[in-house]
Image: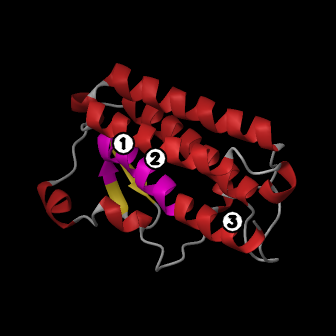
């Protein structure tokens, strides 16, 4: 679990280093009408991490369940998540609607990450590997993989943020 947590920390540091110096007006500016602002991307990341945390907590209250051997052999690799060749529309519940101002938005992101990390460390990898959580596009993964997914998802959106900065920055 420690390796996954370290990777989450690396990705988060890179993201915060990239967005922290951006002024609030640029932070909230959309590059185009149908594209998210940096603020909306950050809010989306917090929504996803909060959702993942809730799903893990929910599954931990159920009896242990493992992925089938067949699923483990043929599941899409998580690194596909951070490839931006295919655009995926976020589920409605994870769309950024009520975006807070920059400082609060970043504070929310940091808080939700700490909650996820605390849960993952407290639960431990063995137990996390004995819960199954469905991903809406990729199918079932175990809880440890879902914690790892958060990092891949953030990497994907860090690339998006860099694209936004190039357009509005």
For the stretch drawn in magenta, the main secondary structure is: helix
Q: Describe residue 26's horizontal placement relative to residue 62 as left or right.
A: right
Camera-side residue of 8 and 133: 8
- Residue 78 drawn above or below residue 11: below
Give residue 153's position: percent from left, percent from top.
47, 56
* Residue 57 numbered tag: none
Report crowding for label 1: few under 14, some 14 to 19, many 20 or more residues within 10 A (C-alpha): some
Residue at image coords 81%, 50%: 23
Can the viewer see residue 61? no
Residue designated by label 1: 7
Earlier along the polypeptide chain: callout 3 or callout 2? 2
- Residue 24 drawn above or below residue 57: below
Give residue 164's position: percent from left, percent from top.
68, 68
Q: Where is residue 106, by image quadrant?
A: top right
Camera-side residue of 158 and 166: 166
- Residue 155 drawn above or below residue 13: below
Segment tinted magenta in the rendering: 141-156
3 vs 1, front mark: 3
Residue designated by label 3: 165
Helix, strand, or loop for circle 2? helix
Distance (Cα) linking label 3 and label 2: 17 Å
Distance (Cα) linking label 2 and label 1: 6 Å
3 vs 2, front mark: 3
Residue designated by label 2: 11
Q: Is residue 102 magenta?
A: no
Residue at image coords 55%, 60%: 157
Q: Describe residue 77's horizontal placement relative to residue 62 as left or right.
A: left
Report crowding for label 2: few under 14, some 14 to 19, many 20 or more residues within 10 A (C-alpha): some
Earlier along the polypeptide chain: callout 3 or callout 1? 1
């Amino acid at each position: 679990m420690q390796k996954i947590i370290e990777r989450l920390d690396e990705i988060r540091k890179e993201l915060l280093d990239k967005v922290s110096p951006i002024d609030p007006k640029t932070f909230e500016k959309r590059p185009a009408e149908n594209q998210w602002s940096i603020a909306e991307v950050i809010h989306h990341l917090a929504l996803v991490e909060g959702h993942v945390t809730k799903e893990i907590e929910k599954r931990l209250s159920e009896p242990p369940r493992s992925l089938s051997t067949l699923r483990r052999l043929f599941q899409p690799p998580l690194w596909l998540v951070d490839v931006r060749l295919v655009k995926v529309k976020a589920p409605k519940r994870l769309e950024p609607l009520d975006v807070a101002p920059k400082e609060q938005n970043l504070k929310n992101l940091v808080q939700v990450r700490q909650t996820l990390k605390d849960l993952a460390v407290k639960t431990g990898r063995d137990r996390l590997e004995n819960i199954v959580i469905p991903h809406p596009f990729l199918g079932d993964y175990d809880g440890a993989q879902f914690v790892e997914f958060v990092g891949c998802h953030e990497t994907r959106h860090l690339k998006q943020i860099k694209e936004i900065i190039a357009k509005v920055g």
